[in-house]
Image (tube, helix red, strand yellow):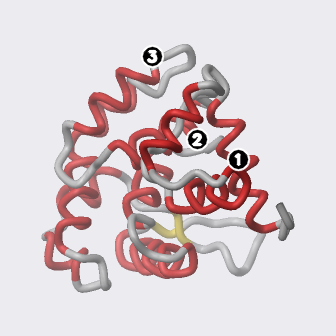
Amino acid sequence: GSVDGFELAVRAVLGQQVTVAGARTLARRLVERFGSDVATPWADVQRAFPAPTALAEAPIERIAELGIIRSRAGAIQALARDWSSLARLLARGADPELLVERLCELPGIGAWTAHYVAMRALGWPDAFPPGDVAALKAMQRLFATASPREAEARAAAWRPWRSYALLRLWNSLSEGDPR
């Protein structure tokens, strides 16, 4: 799940083709530069995640100079600019496939990112981000799946619960499952 769909979507973009630690660093830089001050009972939480308007109005160079490649900075700005219409697609009971379709229309947002956002923001139980490297690695270890096409075919049998399978696949990598 996620408390803030916009933050989740931006973090998903930041996480494209970088490590989790790298994405966390980029998100921290984004918050430091574009976030707003917030009073909390925790000394280490002093900034809120940037509002969509703050990122939509920022010069792309100011985002890119944080170490975010320009195409990803553009994707973040596209999300921010369209957020008012996208936010309606995150309402309880919304159609996850429509959200995926709309997200994929934005520059720099592909099927992996769109499925990930739908899974986390809408709790879509059938999301299965295509080409997920960790899922492919786990499926290779567990089922001798040799290609993304084979992985998709195997995952089709898990419908409509592919998100749950995905989480199990990801967790199998951290558990050191010997299979």
Q: Secondary structure at mark 3?
A: loop
Where is residue 80? Give x, y as percent: 27, 49
Whether residue 5 appears in this view of the structure is no
Tell me the mark number nearer the camera, choosing from 1 and 3: 1
Please tell me how many numbered marks the rendered image carries. Answer: 3
Is 123 positioned to the left or the right of 168 in the image?
Answer: left
Q: Tell me which amino acid carries mark 2.
A: Arg
Q: Which sits earlier in the primary sequence, circle 3 or circle 2? A: 3
The earlier-in-sequence mark between 1 and 3 is 3
Q: Quadrant of residue 46?
A: bottom right
CB contact under 8 Å: marks 2 and 1: no
Residue 167 visible in the snapshot: yes
Q: Is residue 169 above or below residue 91?
A: below
Horizontally, is 103 left or right of 177 in the view? Answer: left
Mark 2 or mark 1: name the one nearer the start of the chain.
2
Q: Secondary structure at mark 1?
A: helix
Where, by quadrant of the figure, is residue 56 drawn?
bottom left
Work out which quarter of the rendered image holds the C terminus and state it.
bottom right
Residue at x-position 69% and y-position 61%: 141
Residue 123's disc number:
none
Quadrant location of the N terminus in the rendered image? top right
Q: Amino acid at mark 1?
A: Leu
Q: Identify the residue under disc 1.
A: 167
Query: To which residue does mark 3 refer?
Result: 95
- How would you rate the neighbour count of disc 3 (Cα within 10 Å): few for under 14, some for 14-19, many for 20 or more? some
- Nearest the eye: 121 or 45: 121
> Residue 149, how many percent across, how many down?
42, 43
The residue carrying pointer 2 sits among few (fewer than 14), some (14 to 19) or many (20 or more) residues within 10 Å by Cα, namely some
Q: CA distance from mark 1 to mark 3?
A: 21 Å
Which residue is label 2 attached to? 120
